Image: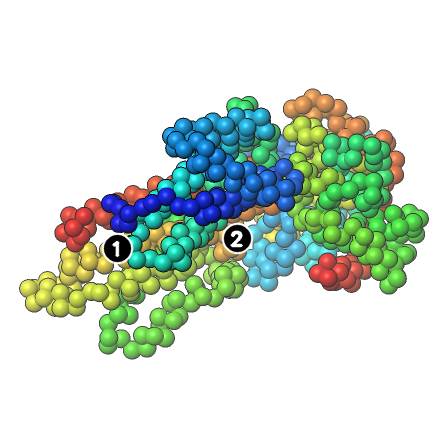
Amino acid sequence: MTPMKTILTTTALTFAAGFANAQDMAKDMTLVSWGGAYQKSQDLAYVQPYLEMHPEVSATWDSSSNEAVAKLRAMNEAGNVTWDVVDVVASDAIRLCDEGLAMEIDPDTQLAAAPDGTSAADDFGDLLVSDCFIPQIVYSTTAAYRPDLLPADAPAPDSICAMFDMETYPGKRTLEKRPINNMEWALLCDGVAKDEVYDVLATEEGQQRGLAKLDTIKDQVVWWSAAAEPPQLLADGEIVMGTSYNGRWFSAIEEQGQPFKMLWDAQVFDLDGWIIPAGLSDERKARALDFIMFATDTQRLADQAAYISYGPARASSAPLVGQHAELGIDMAPHMPTDPNNAKNTFLYNYEFWADYRDDIDAKFQSWLAK
Amino acid sequence: MTALTPISRTPTSFYVPVVAAAGAFAGLLVGTSQGSSVLGVVVGAALMGVVALLLTQVLGNEKIGRWGLFGLLLIAGIFMAGIPGAIVGALFGWFFGWFTFWLFEGRYRAKLAPYLTPGQVLWHFAFRVICGAIFVFLITPILVVMPLSFNAENFFTFTPEMLRFDPAGYSLKHYRDFLTNSDWQNALRNSILIAPAATVLSVGFGTLAAIGLSQPHVPFRRAIMAILISPMIVPLIISAAGMYFFYSRIGLQGTYFGVVLAHAALGIPFVIITVTATLVGFDRSLTRAAANMGANPVTTFFRVQMPLILPGVISGALFAFITSFDEVVVVLFVGSAGQKTLPWQMFTGLREQISPTILAVATILVAVSIVLLTVVEMLRRRSERLRGMSPG
């Protein structure tokens, strides 16, 4: 076979394959996400553009990411997986992958390379924390407060430890109803060095120490379980400070004009991204992969940052981040990864929590009930 | 109603403490909102006690006294808290003016039987106050939602603008969002498709089951009845999980028909119970008479039995409709995102983003329910009147 002929044959085969694929792909997709501003940013940044490119496809949103793990287990047991792509946080993706409920992804063939040719694996880098996980954004859990509700003579809070300082900053606060993040912050404010937090937390005394620190503010804490609650509570004046995701705070401050101030100190980074459930039919799997390839490319992830202040997971997307789609303000200073905001950050340790979560969860819950 | 008992003025030692007690209660409300409950109680009691004494003993003229107190508290309210304060003040002024003279003139006794002891009179009014308090307890959460749905902010908060009755604090944007947002419109369409279909199925099966089970010769009536009623007794989450696995196997999970069937199963017990209750008063000899005159069973059912048990069927249908229209647990399991109903959308909306659009929808649903129930009740009364069943 001559080289020319080989090229021609290959091209023809590729075209044929491409054509066959378009024929074999499912026409309906059910996308699962978190609802709210985040789901809207995904819809505007890549779902609507994808549907415009493929008018024959229809997409349905299901805002069920909160219970994605439980629902996928039930679907798997019933042999009736109705979701095509599911947006989950990294720790859920790791669990789903371990249980065989999510499909493994090969970043080099199934994800788009960066425009400059960098492979997807290198572009995402360390953020590919699981074989099944396709990262989209970096978000952070961080604190915010209402300056007008703090005592007039108190200095503006500049450290997460303000959360534990009832004397300088009296009033109710809100924290997420789970040990993750809260235990780390409690230890940090109890004098543990940042790089030793997880070593201390691995011990029984360390866990008791964290809970004892949380105990000092327990009667002043309103516990939240949905990230929409903290902005509501702070807007109501029910609390004076609290934690939530940075995108929620951004939306309340910049889009709703609420008088909150961010407290970026010791913000905890986490990842959110797609998984494809295991056990899809070939047509649906082909459609899901085709969508993922488009939705997680460099430009699409940068586009998403125009609607919400979460950092794109690809290194190559960062320079493309522009302005807010409606407000026209620069988004870069609102990203959790911006150098000004990331002066003191805390890296969430997936391995630690994978090993200790059930144990510390149980202790935290029984402490809560006390 | 004419007076039953001749009335006379009451002594100061009776009405002044009572008005002072009411004043203490009002003072508690005002004081708590201003930061000091105890101070509010003391000031309220003292103030209203003195006011009662002044109005009756010094002023004496009821009309001037009542209007004067009304105006005085209205102005005091403006100075304390602007327009909302004025409204609260005016309400207090009206109430205390009326209350003082009502007690002072002994009018509270006029419409009660003359032989009642003071204890019975007290209970007569205490009973009404308790009933009123229960009513307020039931209805306040629904009423609070309504003004909040006109909020100009995206939070469940009474903003300072709203409390000042500033038009800028109010807007219809959440109603606009409900009417233009495709998520809400799809959910509304699904609810409107699913609920009537489920109601028709529930009414059909439920009525037939109730008629069959009321025949004395049917074997195992009680056991069958218990099984049919069980969806109402078994915790909803159990039924939902069971339906999820069963419907998944037979391919009904995630289809409209599956959701309709599931909701019909939930609605049937309501229809059975209401229809069975009306059948208790149904005279069997009427069906025999119809048969005697040559009507076949189907004609007998539609021409004789159905019109008489119709009120039970209609109220059962209403319950079945509301069950399906309000239901969130079963549809979360049996439906998929394509069959998202209004309650489902409200549920996820509350959890993911606390948007007042939910309140706007709630207000619309409350209004629709009131209209629906009123219309049905009016139709029922009209048909009863036409058939000569009730004199009114």
Quadrant in the picture for residue B1: top left
- Pick the residue in front: B382 or B355: B382
The secondary element bearing badge 1 is classed as helix
x and y percentages locating residue A61 in the rendered image = 57, 42
The secondary element bearing badge 2 is classed as helix
Q: Is residue B152 left or right of residue A341?
A: left
Residue at 47% in and 47% down: B13
Q: Is residue A60 left or right of residue A86?
A: left
* Residue for badge 2: B332
In the image, is residue B297 above or below residue B54?
below
State which tag comes first along the sequence, 2 or 1.
1
Quadrant placement of the N terminus of chain A: top right
Amino acid at pointer 1: Pro
- Tell which residue pokes out farthest to the left in this image: B293
Give neighbour class at mark 2: few <14, some 14-19, many 20+ (Cα, 10 Å).
Answer: many
Q: CA distance from mark 2 to mark 1?
A: 32 Å
x and y percentages locating residue A272 in the rendered image = 72, 44
Q: Is residue A196 visible?
A: yes
Amino acid at pointer 2: Leu
Residue at 48% in and 49% down: B137
* Residue for badge 1: B311
Residue at 52% in and 61% down: B237
x and y percentages locating residue B104 in the rendered image = 40, 42
Quadrant placement of the C terminus of chain A: bottom right
Q: How many marks?
A: 2
Q: Chain of mark 1?
A: B
Q: Is residue B165 visible?
A: no
